[in-house]
Amino acid sequence: MIYSHDIPSETKLYFGKRAKLKREIEAVSAEVFENNEFDEIVTPYFSYHQQEALDNVQLIKLNDPYNKDLTLRGDSSVDVIRLIIKRLKSNSKKWFYIQPVFRYPTKEINQIGAEILEGVLYEAIKLNKLLMDKFNIKPIIQISNIKIIHILEKMGISTEDLQKGHLENFAKIDWLKQMSYIHSLQDLQDLSIYPEEIRVELLKIKDIIQNLDFDVVIAPLFYANFNYYDGIFYRFFINNVLLSMGGEYEIEGIRAVGFSIYTDNVISSISK
């Protein structure tokens, strides 16, 4: 039996103090973005192109009046970049959005996000950190590089152990074992032990960290399955709760960087 007051699993209900907190977080974020010369965009709830951002099993599928396949918005980045380039034909490079996304079967995720066309990732990380400071949250910041995982796969090294967190199985390869110990900028000082392809990608991480004025944790062997992040990416989390994630990607031949803040998780962290 479904009662009249029931709501679907993983949908969001805010009221009282938490509803006010959500509104304040979004207002503070909008002010920070506007002060940093971002334009705002609100994209449609429905999309024809979400398959490029997410696996089909994550999407809530529907049909338009002409029986064309579409979905509820499951991700904002792809639609934001496409609409800016092709529909708005705007010269603005910096955009932000405050809107929910939806995942199968009934998952609702409130997000605050930013996309910087032709931007550099450390700019996005700094802005993301500024917002966390505004929320009085001190997260752990982890930086990784998805290209390292792809290189390992091309070398014939199984990444199944990475997915399961079994790094001890890499002990037979000296440089791979050594890479599992990389956590700080100091650990990137001497990279001579690593193959050239790996060294190049570690140097990219090093370059970004040198442009930051706060501590980060390097996780070169962190495994993540992304549809569009294709280089360095990062995560903000606290007590194993993901607060934000961002990285480098390319859409329609345009290089960009961006991030999303998971508003619901931020509210829960502040409310504790």
Image (cartoon, rainbow, N blue to C red):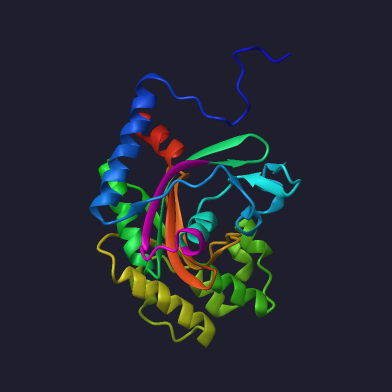
Q: Quadrant of the N terminus?
A: top right
User: Percent from the top left, x then y, of residue 170?
Assistant: 61, 70
Q: Is residue 123 left or right of residue 72?
A: left
User: Percent from the top left, x then y, of residue 24?
Assistant: 31, 33
Q: Can residue 67 be seen from the camera position used here?
A: yes
Q: Quadrant of the C terminus?
A: top left
User: Percent from the top left, x then y, of residue 186?
Assistant: 33, 72
**Residue extending furthest right?**
67
Snapshot quadrant of residue 235: bottom left
Residue at the spot x=64%, y=56% of the render?
Answer: 164
Residue at the spot x=40%, y=62% of the render?
Answer: 90
Q: Is residue 123 left or right of residue 160?
A: left
* Vertical placement of residue 113 versus 230, above or below: above
Residue at the spot x=46%, y=71% of the render?
Answer: 255
Q: Which residues are magenta?
A: 85-100
Foreground: 173 or 62?
62
* Vertical placement of residue 265 versus 6, above or below: below
Q: Can residue 171 be seen from the camera position used here?
A: no
Q: Is residue 99 magenta?
A: yes
Snapshot quadrant of residue 63: top right
Foreground: 257 or 219?
257
Q: Please state the total of marks drawn on the protein image.
A: 0
Residue at the spot x=57%, y=30% of the render?
Answer: 11
Q: Is residue 114 left or right of residue 29?
A: right
Foreground: 174 or 245?
245
